[in-house]
Amino acid sequence: MRPRYFRGAKGDYGGKYELVQGRMIRIVDTPIDSHDVLQSVASPLAGAVVLFLGTTRAVTHGRQTSSLDYECYGEMAAGKLRELADEARRRWPLVGCSLVHRIGHLELGEASVAVAVSSAHRRDAFEAGQWLIDTLKETVPIWKRENWADGTSQWVHPGLGEADAAVFRGEPGGEGERPGEP
């Protein structure tokens, strides 16, 4: 069963498009505009701006990748992104914090995720950015299908337990719907 998407602005999922001073939280089905992400955290109060772009690589664990597909339950994923941004602001003195994730089909080299943070000093920006991408990959209900060059594919998500992963792979014993789906 495919997750249900809730459309906000054109190309956005997860309810309302959110852009306030120093914060952009978006799930999109179009290419990520890194300039817009950087602009969302820019401020004369920031002496450091860190941007991380996660891109589709050609080889994963020794296997040739042809493309990726991402799916999510929009409202749930967008809510979790907001929670992560709020937690990062509690942990570090950030000026800006933006998280954008793309869903749909991605070819090699295309960006799937953007994390941008700004702060007065570089240490806070680097630490917050690393924590955000690591935690996002583990906790946000966005699912990735690796499409291999040999024609096979596999659903992966670092935060899934083995039983949940079996559901994605369609294996025996993998009963029910994908994790996080209502």
Image (cartoon, rainbow, N blue to C red):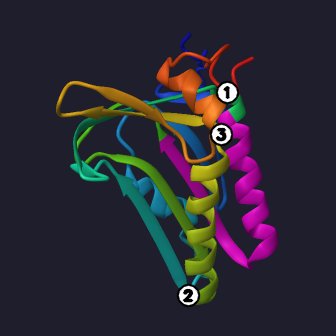
N-terminal of the pair, mark 1 or mark 2, is: 2
- The residue range painted magenta reads 77-101
The amino acid beneath tag 3 is Gly
Can residue 85 be seen by looking at this rendering?
yes
Of tags 1 and 2, the one toward the viewer is: 1
* Rendered location of residue 181, percent (x, y): 69, 21
Residue 80 belongs to magenta span: yes
Can residue 104 be seen here?
Answer: no
Q: Which dot, 2 or 3, sits closer to the camera?
A: 3
Query: Which quarter of the rendering shows the N terminus?
Result: top right
Q: Residues within 10 Å of mark 2 (few under 14, many from 20)?
A: some
- Above or below, 109 against 123 in this view is above
**Mark earlier in primary sequence (1, 3):** 3
Give the image location of residue 42, x and y in percent: 53, 70
Q: Nearer the viewer, residue 50 or 131?
A: 131
| Between 35 and 103, the one nearer to me in the picture | 103
Q: Main secondary structure of the magenta part?
A: helix
Q: Quadrant of the C terminus?
A: top right
Q: What whole-number distance in Å separates the C-alpha atoms at marks 1 and 2?
A: 37 Å
Separation (CA) of disc 1 from disc 3:
10 Å
- Dot 2: what SS? helix
Question: What amino acid is labelled 1 in the image?
Answer: Pro
* Residue 150 in magenta stretch: no
Q: Residue at x 43, y 30 (%)?
A: 29
Residue found farthest to the right = 90
Residue position marked by numbered label 1 in the rendering: 179
Q: Which residue is mark 3?
A: 161
